[in-house]
Amino acid sequence: MTASVDRAAVGLRSERGPVLGALMLAASLIAIDATILATAVPSIVRDLGSYQQFPWLFSIYLLAQAVSVPIYSRFADTIGRKPIILFGIGLFLLGSVLCGVAWDMTWLIIFRLVQGLGAGAVAPMTMTIVGDIYTVAERAKVQGYIASVWAISSVVGPALGGVFSQLDAWRWIFFINIPLCALAGWMLMRRFHEQKQTHRHRIDFAGAALLTIGLTGVILGLLEGGNAWAWLSVPSLLCFGIGALALVVFAMVERRAAEPIIDFALFSRRLILVTTLVSFGVGALLIGVTSFAPAYLEGSLGIAPLLSGLAVGALTLGWPIAATIVGRLYLSIGFRRTSLIGLSISTVAAGMLALTGPYPNPFTVAGIAFVLGFGLGWTAAPTLIAAQASVGWGQRGVVTGMNAFARSAGSAVGVAVLGAISNAVIRQGAGAHDPATIISASTWVFVGAAVTAAVTLVVLLFMPRDTAPVA
């Protein structure tokens, strides 16, 4: 199969169309879940109480997804993609049902953990399977189909969440996943027949356990440090201490493992190292805008949460729009140049957000967020596809998983560092209820996001030069 294949050969009506449709459904599970819950938080708190606990609905999901991605990805390279993605869909379905029947906030948080563990398999496997069944040139077209899922979800998710919240039926936020999971799983079981390498494998259970403990400790410390507890406190020291120790032991174990969870030799390849670091920076930049901009608009202008959400939602709309057309660009000028153009756009946008921070305006934020997302759409896909194309079947899952994990880890670190900056400014000012203090704190957060974008752009300059791919 070459670049001359027409769109019908990679579309939904092609031979591989049912598999593509199933992957789009699987992606929709994660895409909708990323946006549907936030608008329903007030109604959930009203029913279940525990306002102080609700941030854990997001933190625990992010944590579970981040720590499980590398493990699923390694297993996918040994036992195949199909059993992993089906397991993930099943776990996500179970978590959704349990969340829908949760009787208090504590159990809802626990069930979100189950959902996150399912998402940790679905998200990377979707992109890994795309890399398996389509050539690089074909993926330039397929990317548009996958991106359309995120574009639609960026609008449908908040709308559905708002409707269910308005109708006092927030449980349907989770129940709506039932038919989507069932249909995606059925289509994959029926139509996806993978050709995997067949030989005996030695599963690295010790490495998996150590990595889980290590990442859980470090990411939990980053997510909750300065929020649930002080940075210099016993819980923080325990999280970082246990996490760091487990990761050190993990690195020692992996050097002797026959089939390690993470093959550190991959990082000796400049392309893999750079694209992984760029994904980390993209995660930090993304969370820096989406997490803090709504509070910035609400706290400074007093606008409704729905309006602030729509303003920031322009970012999640710009990203998939760019992703639908980026394939033609990287096929023409190569992965590196395309990614540099995209990240340059995002860096300028992040700088503009910092410059306009003292002058809050929802239309300004929406416009800048759209441009920022557009640039990221021209960065994330080319760097991932370049990394996937550089390895064979037996390493593609790990490489895709490292990319996904790096973005999740970047988000966790971004929340922690930028949150610490915001909290420091608020403590020195008149408090979180003072609009001027909120503006000042948010402006410094946006400065931090702009610096993150600039540093990531410098890292991207070290990506090896490439020519336009043809296969």
Image (cartoon, rainbow, N blue to C red):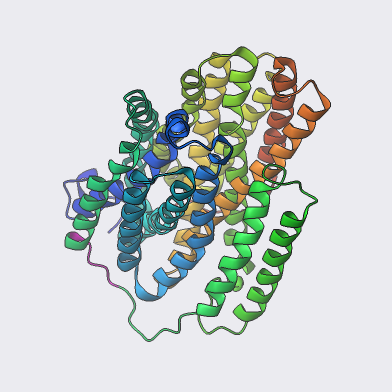
Q: Nearer the viewer, residue 98 or 464?
A: 98
Q: Is residue 309 left or right of residue 340?
A: left
The image position of residue 395, as x and y in percent, is 46, 69
Q: Nearer the viewer, residue 23 or 324?
A: 23
Q: Residue drawn at (31%, 25%), measured in percent from left and top?
A: 167
Q: Residue furthest right?
A: 428
Q: Nearer the viewer, residue 99 or 59?
A: 99
Asked if residue 179 is positioned above or below residue 297 in the image, the reply reads: below
* Number of on-image labels: 0
Q: Which span of residues is magenta-colored?
A: 191-195
The image position of residue 327, as x and y in percent, is 40, 43
Asked if residue 462 is positioned above or below residue 34 in the image, the reply reads: below
Q: Residue drawn at (24%, 56%), measured in percent from left and top?
A: 185
Considering the image in quadrants, where does the C terminus appear?
A: bottom left
The image position of residue 98, as x and y in percent, is 35, 51
Q: Is residue 159 left or right of residue 373?
A: left
Q: Quadrant of residue 173?
A: top left
Considering the image in quadrants, where does the N terminus appear?
A: bottom left
Asked if residue 426 is positioned above or below residue 326 in the image, the reply reads: above
The image position of residue 122, as x and y in percent, is 38, 55
Instruction: Using the rendered image of the protein, determine whether residue 86 is visible from the camera's viewpoint.
Output: yes
Q: Residue drawn at (20%, 50%), measured in percent from left and top?
A: 183
Instruction: Using the rendered image of the protein, determine whether residue 270 is visible from the camera's viewpoint.
Output: no
- Does the magenta stretch mainly form a helix, a strand or a loop? loop
State yes or no: residue 397 in magenta. no
